Image (tube, coloured by chain):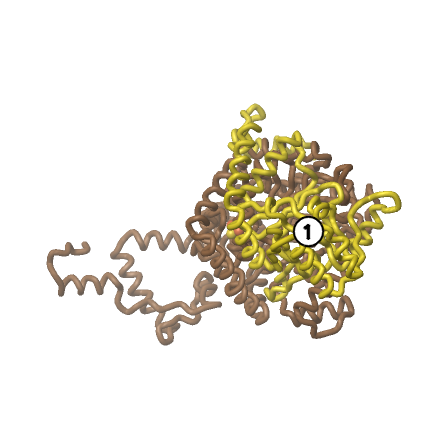
Chain colours: A brown, B yellow
Amino acid sequence: MQPRTQEFSKLAARALGDTQVQKALLGLQTGFDQARQRAILELTPEAWDRLRDRAREIRRHTLERLDYYVGLLADNVVRNGGAVHFARDAHEAAQIVLDIARRNGVKLAVKGKSMVSEEMALNHLLAANGVEALETDLGEYIIQLAGETPFHIVAPAIHKSQEEVAELFARKLGTPEGADAEALTRIARETLRQKFLQAGMGISGVNFAIAETGTVCIVTNEGNGRMSTSLPPIHVALMGMEKVTPALEDLGVFYRLLPRAATGQRATSYFTLVSGPRRNEDEDGPEQFHLVMMDNGRSRLLADPELREALFCIRCGACLNACPVYRKVGGHAYGWVYPGPIGAVVTPAMVGLPKAVALPFASTLCGACREVCPVKINIPRMLLKLRADAVEGAPGQRKASWYEGLTFRAWGRLMRSERTLARARGVAVFLQRPFSRDGWLQKMPLPLFYRWTRGRDFPTLARRSFHELWEDELRTSSPQVPPLR
Amino acid sequence: MKREEFLSAVRTALGGGADAPIPEYLPMMLRPADQRQKVVTIEARARARRSQLIVRLADMAARQGWKAYRAASPEDGMAYVVALAKEKGARSAVRSGHEVFQRLPLDAALRGQGVQVMPVALGPGVTREQLREAMARADLGITGADYAIAETGSVALLPRQGVSRLVSLLPPVHVAIVEAHQVYETLDDLWALRRMAFLEGNGDMGSYLSLISGPSRTADIEQTLVVGVHGPLEAHMVIMV
Ligand code: SF4
């Protein structure tokens, strides 16, 4: 996938003007986010909090020795009869999958949901080389038919209305128009069922991978994950290397957190643990099992003590649903695979900060993401750090523009002296007059201010400052209070 | 990329060397004897609370979207399945080879109703492809269980002889027969039991574990819940009390 991270403003503006997208985004609040809250209440908030702390401990421990656990996982996958492949970046990972497909003469691959495969732009590479890769998760299937990218990491097609999907299916599959959600789901079931039975390869993502036992774990509701890992003769599992966890018991933490945080479920319909290909005595299952472990910028996050925490993420999407910015601009504005608060942190590591510089700024730093995060990731702190990197300029990166620097230097001077501030205030109150109407500035000159008022109004400076009011207050009230100066 | 290159890049990112000691992680340090003790405790707790656990299992299963039925006797349980087959107008069923079916003459009961029953068993004249065909065509998929978990209303299935994961996946209706002694309290119990199997199996706990907690479902279109996507449209849990 070609990043469009430089077009944030344009894409955001487009989403803001799209009534269907706005309606869908509202639904995320009443849907997923409230379901999440109910699920936490059912478990009790105290138990929830203990799980989150435990999850943090496990993630911290694992990442501190990620080399060891990745190696252990690889050893045990091999011991189970599987093959392990290592990929430095997304391109290399996609090439590995293509090679496996070619070696085995695969013409059709069925795919479960995998965000890592989006990083790899896998479908395109496979298609360009004569291998049809079919998305089977309903949301992903819709997205693929529409030729779009996922809008949300858990519900990829959530921005589309039922009518839009019905219209899309009618156009692409020749099904009757005006079908409702249930009918559309049945259509997908019928259409994809044959494909599952014919496919030469099944591709899945990985939610957790257990180092000690060489097991990949897949969390799904639709059953497509089970199908693509048991019907085709080859199963290829794709994972970001940070998904490894030491032991089976860790699932007691993560499989309690993920479904609740993602969709408010206490358990998903299916939780599938795969430990290698079918054994001789098994009645079904793939003959080959391949695990592709990908870095793609993750070691960059790992190396930065201030950003390592981003690798704690279990991709539940809760921070998207809670984010006041995501809830307005939606997933496509972020221009790459991972949207929302966590996307604003990991995307710069994957596509480079200079290209993704708008993302860390697309936040109000309200802290809602950190509050809902099942792993308590301190996203706002990392966004601030990325902003600092962007402005102060790690080598080769963007510096602040000259007028932004000038403005803040002037601001610094003003704030150091109360007298100067009061004087500047007086001037500003005078200068704002021609622009103000009913206490609001609707359009201001100068690039910095102009950009603010392009999308919203700015309150005018009050006629009298707080300082002045306070002085009055002191003069008329009890003398014990020490004067301000 | 070579494994060693990959790992050394990770090591560099961590700022550590290849000679760092093996990290200590508690669950991985338990000896088989300790784990055995843990499992004995879990089994004892499950036995002591069996009747409560069964009630809880049925309750949670229902909340997860199963049709849960507590059968008072084996005959009662079989009658439920036969009635279900009738209601669905089922003409064919596939059945996995779980042990419970040695005690439960379910095949005969279903055949008596004109339902064709195909057990999952390779043998003379039965190939993998034929089995797969049968499973893809069947109206009912009937399985036993390896474990049932009250906490989440789940059934866990493992690879065994005569057991295919497709039985609980391809037919539009899945029926899982759960026996009382298979019911455990929490997911943690399940992971502890599987670790025991892992230790006893010399590091092999089988090629898969399917934890099933209801029928297949989606909310991908406008967050509207639709039950029955790629997997079963209906899931029934019959608990033999
Ligand atoms: S950062 Fe936290 S809330 Fe956001 S997707 Fe990751 S785990 Fe979920």
Q: Secondary structure at mark 1?
A: helix
> Residue A435: percent from the left, percent from the top?
39, 72
Furthest-left residue in this view: A479
Q: Is residue A346 above or below residue B93?
A: above
Q: In the shown orientation, is residue B89 left or right of residue A424? A: right
As drawn, which residue projects farthest toward the bottom? A438
Visible residue check, residue B168:
yes
User: Which residue in the protein does label 1 denote?
Assistant: A225
User: In x, y percent, where is residue A114?
Assistant: 66, 50
State left or right for residue A352 relative to residue A198: left
Beta carbon of the mark 1 residue lies under 8 A of ligand 1: no
Callout 1 amino acid: Gly
Q: Residue at x 51, y 39 (%)?
A: A58
Please name whichever residue, A13 or B227, is drawn nearer the observer in this view of the structure: B227
| For residue B206, side relative to residue A395 (left or right) | right
B120 or B209, nearer to the observer: B120
